Image (cartoon, rainbow, N blue to C red):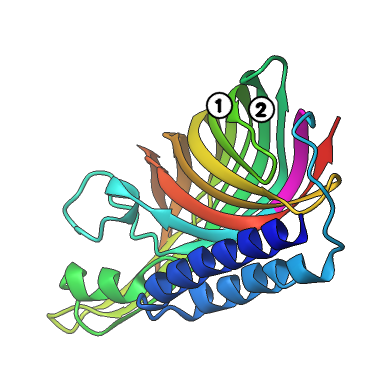
Amino acid sequence: MLQSFEFSKELLLRILNYITSKILKLKSNTMKKILLIILCLTIMIPLVTAQEADINKRGYLGISIGAAIPVGEFGSTDIGGEYSGFAKTGLSFQLINFGYRLGKNLGIAGLWSGSAFNMDVDALVNNSGLGAVNVEADPWSFGAFMGGLLISIPSDKFDIDFRGLIGFSYGKTPEMTISGYDIEGNYAFVKQTSGTSNSFAYDLGVGIRYNVSRLICINLLLDYMGSKPKFSTDLFSANGYYGKSEFDQPMNHITITGGIGFRLK
């Protein structure tokens, strides 16, 4: 049993090292910090006493952290795009990641998560043609509470999970200020307040759980989340209140997270 444990541990670490090498090529400091957290969690594996994992364990309750990668129009930097969000790769935190098998393979799942994305202000300035301007912007924020179907393939050491979830999301736009001089030398100032909105959301995900013992598992998760909230914000110019802006904003993104969980009976 100990030899089997050592082999599974070595295999998992090789997989994590391969994923780490690929993600590090993104040259993102945020990603490096995320990976350090994930790797710190995996270091716990050899420190836990090797026990026979119980295949009859039906559920798990976990927590994870990782990268949130905007896709489609949410991450677009096309200044002429109707839904361009100029969102950069950010941080995702899954506070509650839950699954429970009601039968051999089918069960229920739940997720409570939050993500934050900085705006790509450099791309906004470079693509705007406004000239020498300064842009200050808060991050995009996204949170979701969802539940749905779980399909799980259990084994003594590795469980593979597929889930489809629906629920509600909370979105928040950046508060943004643009100031400086346009290409004709005229001073410009525009401020857009932050707006919030609740909307329908969905999630399609897959995960691998490594069962360290009868009580603890290590999770590696890949999720695609989608939502399209409608926001309302106020606009101000140098002369005061300018008007109101209402717009739909797709906030689709992929999350890659890793963490720890407790196995449930």
Q: Is the magenta stretch mostly helix, strand or loop?
A: strand
Which residue sits furthest left? Answer: 184
Q: Earlier in the sequence, mark 2 or mark 1?
A: 2
Which residue corresponds to the image point at 66% horizontal and 18% vertical from the top-left? Answer: 104
Helix or strand or loop: what does disc 1 sit on?
strand
* Crowding near the residue tagged with mark 1, few <14, some 14–19, many ≥20 C-alpha atoms within 10 Å: many
Which residue corresponds to the image point at 42% horizontal and 47% vertical from the top-left? Answer: 253
Given the image, on which type of amino acid does mark 2 rest? Ala
Query: The C terminus appears in which quarter of the rendering?
Result: top right
Q: Mark 2 points at which residue?
A: 109
Mark 2 or mark 1: which is in front?
2
Q: Does the magenta stretch include residue 61?
A: yes
Seen in the image, is 99 located left or right of residue 213?
Answer: left
Given the image, on which type of amino acid does mark 1 rest? Leu
Q: What stretch is highlighted in magenta?
A: 58-63
Image position of 35 with respect to 229: above or below: below
Q: Please tell me in which quadrant of the rendered image residue 168 appears.
A: top right
Image position of 135 with respect to 219: above or below: below
Which residue corresponds to the image point at 55% horizontal and 43% vertical from the top-left? Answer: 207
Q: Name the residue under label 1.
A: 165
Helix or strand or loop: what does disc 2 sit on?
strand
Q: Is residue 191 magenta?
A: no
Which residue corresponds to the image point at 36% horizontal and 72% vertical from the top-left? Answer: 121
Which residue sits furthest top? Answer: 103
For residue 264, which numbered disc appears in the image?
A: none
What percent of the width, then of the height, locates residue 118?
47, 66
Q: Please tell me in which quadrant of the rendered image residue 39 appears.
A: bottom right
Q: Please tell me in which quadrant of the rendered image residue 111 appears.
A: top right
What percent of the width, then of the height, locates residue 28?
43, 78
Q: Are marks 2 and 1 in contact (CB under 8 Å)?
A: yes
